[in-house]
Amino acid sequence: MSRVPRVAVVLGATDDPSRDSYKAIMSFQGEGYTVLPVNPMLDRIAGMPVVHCLEDVEGPVSILSVYVKYVSLFTAAIVRLRPRCVVFNSGVLSDHLEHVLRAEGIRFVRDCTLRLLADGGMERFLDKDVSSLLP
């Protein structure tokens, strides 16, 4: 039986171990996800290659974890990517993007990636029907 690969994209990734986006990268990796950190200014984070632009991410994405404040700038790229779930971490708000995601049937949640991973809540968002998750 083949298993669907679990891919986590971290938009706003950093190489600073004290920051939540770095901790999310490590947590996703520890949970067995393939991690694609996205940051235009870095080449590697904890030995992993960094994608410089969200538009360069290809293939199915399980989770897009967002740590950038101006996420609306990435609306077209996020819709094209069609992640199974988008997590808007603390301080990331975009009514416009949420409206677009809702219209596109892309799940999203305003929550903390680290908390969701720690309590097993991330899998809940990947396994449920889309209609039960949309606000």
Image (cartoon, rainbow, N blue to C red):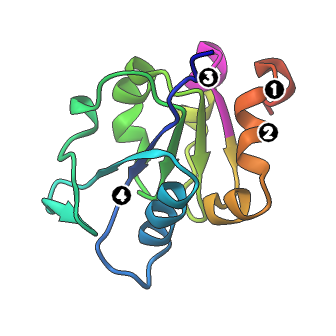
CA gap, disc 1 to disc 2? 6 Å
**In the image: residue 108, left or right of residue 64:** right
Say which label, 2 or 4, has the lower sequence index: 4
Where the N terminus falls, by quadrant? Answer: top right
Q: Is residue 63 above or below residue 35?
A: above
Could you say which disc has been placed on residue 124 in the image?
2
Crowding near the residue tagged with mark 3, few <14, some 14–19, many ≥20 C-alpha atoms within 10 Å: many
CA gap, disc 3 to disc 2? 15 Å
Q: Amino acid at mark 2?
A: Arg
- The residue tagged with tag 2: helix, strand or loop? helix
The residue lying toward the viewer, choosing from 9 and 99, is 9
**In the image: residue 13, left or right of residue 118:** left
Q: Position of residue 2 (x, y in %)?
A: 57, 17
Q: Is residue 102 above or below residue 56?
A: above
Task: Return the residue found at the far front.
Answer: 1
Where the C terminus falls, by quadrant? Answer: top right
**In the image: residue 7, left or right of residue 131:** left
Residue linked to disc 4: 12
Q: Position of residue 88 (x, y in %)?
A: 59, 50
Residue linked to disc 3: 106
Residue linked to disc 1: 128
